Image: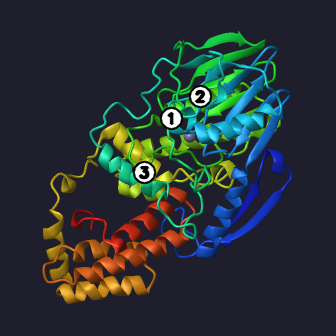
């Protein structure tokens, strides 16, 4: 088999069931795991758009999921004398549109709301589902601990969040957010949040609401405060954000505390063990059919575990994060599964997160105990190639050869040199970022590269950032 050629079988679930989209992809000279030819990257991201087709999916008798009313999903279960809502979107504007769409299937009062976890895109629109009634609102004991309690670095996290999701990109630059559409209206964030009133204990909870049997299972993963919901009679599983159609975001480049990767794998393994007939993800289309749903969950758990195990094995033979980020891969038999393509999560980023999560920043190599400061290193690099002029030429040559990562790394040296053309270095960095972005099908990387290029070009980034 030609090793530059990978064949991807893309199968959209639910409404698009039966639709096969076969993409023959030819990987170019790209370095990153998620870098392909520009037209291929766009084609893949366009294919992923099928996961965000707006509408109500009837996932089982009396169970409905609203997809793409905002970035995440919200679901309604219709019981005897009322309904249950699982997750409530980002704010009241999007939630009221989903609530209205649900009403065509049932106008019974809301008896319960369940938050799968505390991320803003799942909790901000609760008030839009509720009239005069006072529903029970279920969440875990640790609800609210999703991002840790440390707000000290919020100013920079906000900047990075805008880049990761491409919030300031123009429509022509936008594709999607990996597991969510681009261009959501985020102006009413959290304005409809209603606080939880029932705590799910750490050993879970079985209860009945509106005649519907419900089981809550504590399921740390993307966040420590996550749970999943199981309907034992209907065999429907609501996974929250521990499952969606993309390799999971084991680390978010907007900046997060360590997400316990082993817990995540185990939580998804527990879901698979239930052999659901439908799995409703926190984002993207539900997967229907026992075989499809169960296989997806067990594959997902296995892929996470494999990335963790490969990283740990590498650590224990003395390899550092830079090397492991290039070596660790999704196992061959799983890598082309549609729900494991790296549209949102990235294996190299996950490897670095696992490394830092287990050992902290130090890679064990004494060279890195006290490395040269960037300005001194840049001066030495310049001397090495014969001066600033030569280093600048190498930077330009890398860009001309579309060796974008190397062009970026050289521009980061050139910017420190007092006798360098810093305007030129900045220009090269902008072009290299756009070159990398065009080849990326990992949406957070793509959005980050493009956003950063725009910020550099417009002059809004201070010198510290360049
Ligand atoms: Zn989410």
Where disc 2 sits, the SS reads: helix
Residue 148 quadrant: top left
CA gap, disc 2 and disc 1:
8 Å
Instruction: Single out the residue that lies furthest toward the front.
Output: 132
Select label 3 or label 2 by which is in front.
2
Q: What residue is pinned by disc 1?
A: 191
- Residue found 36% across the figure and 57% down from its top: 322
* Disc 3 to disc 1: CB gap under 8 Å: no
* Disc 2 to disc 1: CB gap under 8 Å: yes
* Marked residue nearer the N-terminal end (2 or 1): 2
The answer to which of 24 and 108 lies nearer the viewer is 108
- Residue found 86% across the figure and 52% down from its top: 18
- Residue found 62% across the figure and 45% down from its top: 70
For ligand 1, tell me if the residue under mark 3 lies within 8 Å. no
Dot 2: few (<14), some (14–19), or many (≥20) neighbours within 10 Å?
some
Q: What residue is pinned by disc 3?
A: 161
Q: What residue is pinned by disc 2?
A: 127
């Amino acid at each position: 088999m030609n090793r530059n050629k990978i064949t991807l079988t893309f199968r959209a679930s639910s409404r698009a069931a039966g639709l096969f989209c076969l993409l023959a992809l030819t990987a170019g000279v790209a370095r990153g795991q998620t870098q392909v030819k520009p037209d291929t990257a766009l084609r893949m991201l366009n294919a992923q758009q099928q996961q965000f087709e707006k509408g109500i999916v009837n996932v089982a008798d009396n169970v409905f999921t609203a997809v793409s009313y905002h970035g995440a999903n919200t679901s309604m279960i219709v019981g005897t004398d009322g309904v249950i809502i699982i997750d409530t979107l980002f704010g009241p504007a999007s939630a009221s549109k989903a609530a209205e769409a649900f009403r065509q299937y049932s106008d019974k009062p809301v008896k319960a709301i369940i938050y799968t976890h505390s991320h803003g895109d799942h909790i901000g629109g609760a008030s839009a589902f509720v009239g005069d009634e006072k529903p029970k609102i279920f969440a875990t004991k640790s609800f609210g601990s999703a991002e840790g309690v440390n707000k000290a670095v919020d100013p920079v996290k906000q900047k990075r969040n805008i880049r990761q999701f491409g919030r300031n990109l123009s429509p022509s630059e936008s594709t999607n957010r990996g597991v969510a559409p681009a261009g959501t209206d985020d102006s009413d964030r959290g304005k409809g949040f209603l606080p939880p009133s029932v705590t799910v204990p750490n050993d879970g909870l079985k209860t009945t609401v509106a005649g519907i049997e419900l089981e809550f299972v504590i399921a740390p993963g993307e966040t420590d405060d996550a749970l999943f919901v199981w309907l034992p009679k209907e065999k429907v599983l609501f996974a929250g954000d521990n499952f969606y159609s993309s390799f999971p975001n084991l680390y978010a480049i907007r900046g997060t505390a360590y997400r316990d990767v082993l817990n995540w794998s185990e939580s998804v393994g527990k879901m698979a063990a239930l052999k659901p007939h439908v799995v409703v993800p926190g984002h993207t289309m539900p997967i229907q059919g026992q075989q499809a749903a169960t296989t997806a969950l067990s594959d997902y758990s296995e892929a996470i575990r494999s990335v963790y195990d490969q990283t740990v094995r590498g650590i224990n033979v003395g390899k550092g994060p830079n090397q492991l980020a290039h070596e660790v891969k999704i196992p061959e038999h799983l890598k082309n599964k549609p729900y494991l393509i790296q549209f949102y999560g990235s294996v190299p980023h996950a490897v670095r997160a696992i490394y830092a999560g287990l050992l902290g920043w130090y890679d064990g190599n004494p060279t890195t105990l006290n490395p040269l400061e960037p300005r001194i290193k840049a001066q030495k690099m310049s001397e090495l190639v014969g001066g600033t002029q030569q280093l600048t030429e190498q930077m330009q040559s890398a860009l001309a050869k579309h060796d974008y990562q190397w062009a970026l790394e050289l521009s980061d040296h050139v910017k420190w040199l007092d006798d360098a053309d810093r305007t030129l270095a900045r220009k090269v960095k902008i072009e290299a970022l756009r070159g990398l972005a065009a080849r990326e099908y990992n949406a957070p990387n793509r959005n980050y590269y493009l956003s950063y290029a725009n910020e550099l070009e417009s002059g809004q980034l201070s010198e510290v950032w360049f």
